[in-house]
Image: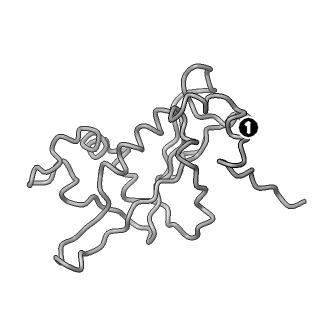
Amino acid sequence: MTTPAAHIWKPRGGPYQPGTGAAINVTSGRAKKVLIVAASPSTSPSTGWPIGFWAAELTHPFFELMDAGFEVEIASPDGGAIAMDGYSDPRHESGYSWEDLVSMGFVNTPRLAALLDTPSRLTSTSMLHPVPLKGIPGWDAANEVEDYYRDTQQFRPGRRKAA
């Protein structure tokens, strides 16, 4: 068994079990993939302070998606290590986000914190496959039925491969 790339988190467990809420591609039996794009570290033009991504905007969806069985990949526009904005880091001396226990758990779990050191580089928009909000499992009770996704007024059909 090969080790997954450092910037990808694969869900634990074996084959999909009905009723678990796992997001499985029903044709291949593999976990569906999600790409989370976080801002590359920068400096604020107005204050000169270092800025990064807002912790809760990455960590909260990360755990929700992982819990639903998705394979989650983290990327940044420039590649290389990414950093939380200081005020969003629950360990920051300001105490601004001290109550964000989800982000605290993320940064204090070495295997997860390491994902911030080695994100993929967003090399092209072909890495992005947008999903309408209505396509998120659990958003609408109706989306539990496969026919829901055949509504071409809300969802575009899948791309066909060239012969």
Query: Which residue is rendered at x = 65% and y = 48% of the image?
Result: 154
Considering the image in quadrants, where does the C terminus appear?
Answer: bottom right
Direction front: furthest residue: 153
Q: Where residue 43 sits in the image (x, y, percent)? A: 25, 75
Point out residue 159 in the picture as x, y percentages from the top left corner: 76, 55
> Which residue is situated farthest in the right direction here?
163
Residue 18 at x, y percent in the picture = 62, 20
Q: Is residue 101 left or right of residue 125?
A: left
Residue at left offset 28%, top offset 58%: 84
Q: Which residue is mark 1?
A: 28
Quarter of image, res 54: bottom left
Relative to 128, say whether 123 is above or below: below
Q: Looking at this view, is 96 or 147 the one in front?
A: 147
Q: Find the residue positioned furthest to the left.
A: 94
Q: Residues within 10 Å of mark 1 (few under 14, many from 20)?
A: few
Position of residue 152 measured from the top left corner of the image (x, y, whole percent): 72, 48
Tell me the kind of residue under disc 1: Ser
Q: Is residue 5 above or below residue 144?
A: below
Residue 79 or 126: which is nearer the viewer?
Answer: 126
Residue lying at 24% horizontally and 60% vertically, measured from the top left: 85
Q: Is residue 66 left or right of residue 39?
A: right
